[in-house]
Image (cartoon, rainbow, N blue to C red):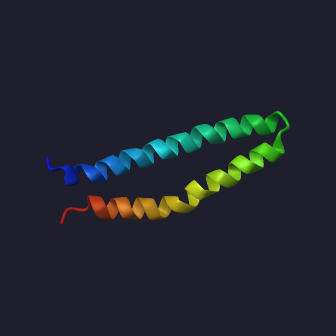
Amino acid sequence: MPNSDLIPPLLHKLNENQLALEAAIMELTLWIEMQGSSEVGGNVRGALDVIAQNEEFINVSLKTLMTPE
């Protein structure tokens, strides 16, 4: 398999890892907020919004890269 064929699956796996980290961080954020640290929770949610905003572009790009020519 040529190296260029590895790029789309690699990017897909990296995106999966990113989404898994997002979910784990959100769980921690919920716990932090339950402890009364709403300011910290708000800061983390703001950072996680960046992941959410970029998710559609990443998914469309991955789908395009993985479509056979």
Residue 57, position in %: x, y? 46, 64
Image quadrant in which you'd find residue 68: bottom left
Residue 50, position in %: x, y? 60, 57
**In the displayed structure, does residue 9 sit left or right of residue 32?**
left
**In the displayed structure, does residue 14 sit left or right of residue 7?**
right
**In the displayed structure, does residue 25 sit left or right of residue 39?**
left
Could you tell me which residue is drawn at 74 percent across and 34 percent down?
31
Residue 4, position in %: x, y? 21, 54
Could you tell me which residue is drawn at 43 percent across and 49 percent down?
15
Q: Give the farthest residue toward the right.
A: 36
Q: Is residue 64 above or below residue 30?
A: below
| In the foreground, 34 or 41 | 41
Quadrant in which the C terminus is drawn: bottom left
Count of numbered tags: 0
| In the foreground, 47 or 67 | 47
Q: Is residue 64 above or below residue 14?
A: below
**In the displayed structure, does residue 66 sit left or right of residue 16?**
left
Residue 9, position in %: x, y? 30, 48
Q: Give the farthest residue toward the left.
A: 1
Q: Give the farthest residue toward the front.
A: 3
Image quadrant in which you'd find residue 64: bottom left
Could you tell me which residue is drawn at 83 percent across and 39 percent down?
37
Could you tell me which residue is drawn at 40 percent across and 64 percent down?
60
